[in-house]
Image: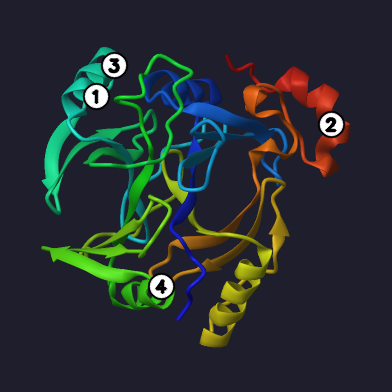
Amino acid sequence: MIKEINGLHHVTSMASDAVENNAFFTDVLGLRRVKKTVNFDAPDVYHLYYGNERGEAGTVMTYFPFPNMMKGKAGVGEVGTTAFSVPDGTLDHWLNRLFEMGVSDVEKSQTFGENRLNFSGPDGDGFALVEVNEDARAPWTGGDVGADTAIRGFHSASMRLRDGGASAELLKFMGYELFDTSGDVSRFVIPNGNGADFIDVETLPSIERAQQGAGSVHHIAFAVEDRAAQLAVRSALLDTGYQVTPVIDRDYFWAIYFRTPGGVLFEIATNEPGFGRDEHVSELGQGLQLPTQHEHLRSELEKTLRPLV
């Protein structure tokens, strides 16, 4: 069994408009834009990262905003809901804030004994805020959301699958333990994790397969401390029969990828070197940071990429 994984690292999705996406995460949800860079494979498209002050593992939502991209179609074989942790007793505050900010489909619910708000992002992305007692992670407070109510980081990601059995076994192999089951949802937890500790597996045998587009999660990433831990995880996955990519340098972390039995793309990402490798922490997310191979395109990209506040 793999022992090196310590929770979620980041969640990466797709959007149809960079300006709208940036405004939603920074203005509505009050997260910090910790990096403004570009897609490695399509440098004319932003890659935007939002998280806490330093963009610590377990707090970062990332987006590829492809201009005018068609919306995805929800179904099985994808991450359906990405949930964020907020302090206990703050859901009424968030309910009012979301309505005031024009988020119209907010609904209260309770899952596994936890109070939550379910709502959609600009492209129909599925999100939730979950009340958590004593989440010690430091929030970003540089906007207009105070420390007593601000998002702490991820709480969980929920996968919609036609058959959850094989993915459940994979999660157990990755070090997760079954936490509880409610109806067709099984919750798994990573012991002694980084705060972004839960994965929910929702089994929906009669639902059609998802079609990815704007609002769809492209992949979810799990955190390991360093490259040595990542190589140990890669070796264990290969030995079990998974087809895993070579290690890829993503500038702010090292990454490997593999497709799960249910169709969801998993990534294993290192906590090193972090988002401060090319910007001081006080300036994270302000300047356009380009991968070395695309630096020669800077003058052109600065003219064509839409400005972000």
**Which badge, 3 or 2, is on the more N-terminal residue?**
3
At 53% from the left and 38% from the top, the residue drawn is 63
User: Mark 4 and 3 residues: CB-CB less than 8 Å, in contact?
Assistant: no
- On the image, which quarter does residue 179 sit in? bottom left
Tag 4 secondary structure: loop
Of the two numbered discs 4 and 1 in the rendering, the one whose residue sits closer to the viewer: 4
How far apart are the two marked residues, 4 and 3, measured between alpha carbons? 40 Å
Badge 1 amino acid: Trp
Tag 3 secondary structure: loop
Q: Which residue is mark 1?
A: 94
Q: Which residue is mark 3?
A: 102
Q: Is 119 drawn above or below residue 81 in the view shown?
A: above
Q: Is 122 drawn above or below residue 170 in the view shown?
A: above
Q: Nearer the viewer, residue 210 or 54?
A: 54
Q: Position of residue 212 (x, y in %)?
A: 44, 49
User: Mark 3 and 2 residues: CB-CB less than 8 Å, in contact?
Assistant: no
Tag 2 secondary structure: helix
At 29% from the left and 16% from the top, the residue drawn is 102
Q: Which of the colour schemes (rainbow, by chain, secondary structure, one colour) is used?
A: rainbow
Q: Which mark is residue 297?
A: 2
The crowding category of the residue bearing disc 2, from other C-alpha atoms within 10 Å (few below 14, some 14 to 19, many at least 20), is few
Q: Is 171 drawn above or below residue 64 in the view shown?
A: below
Q: Position of residue 305 (x, y in %)?
A: 68, 23
- On the image, which quarter does residue 98 sit in? top left
Badge 2 amino acid: Leu
Q: Is residue 39 left or right of residue 298?
A: left
Of the two numbered discs 1 and 3 in the rendering, the one whose residue sits closer to the viewer: 1
**Which badge, 4 or 3, is on the more N-terminal residue?**
3
Q: Which residue is mark 4?
A: 175
Badge 4 amino acid: Gly
At 38% from the left and 25% from the top, the residue drawn is 29
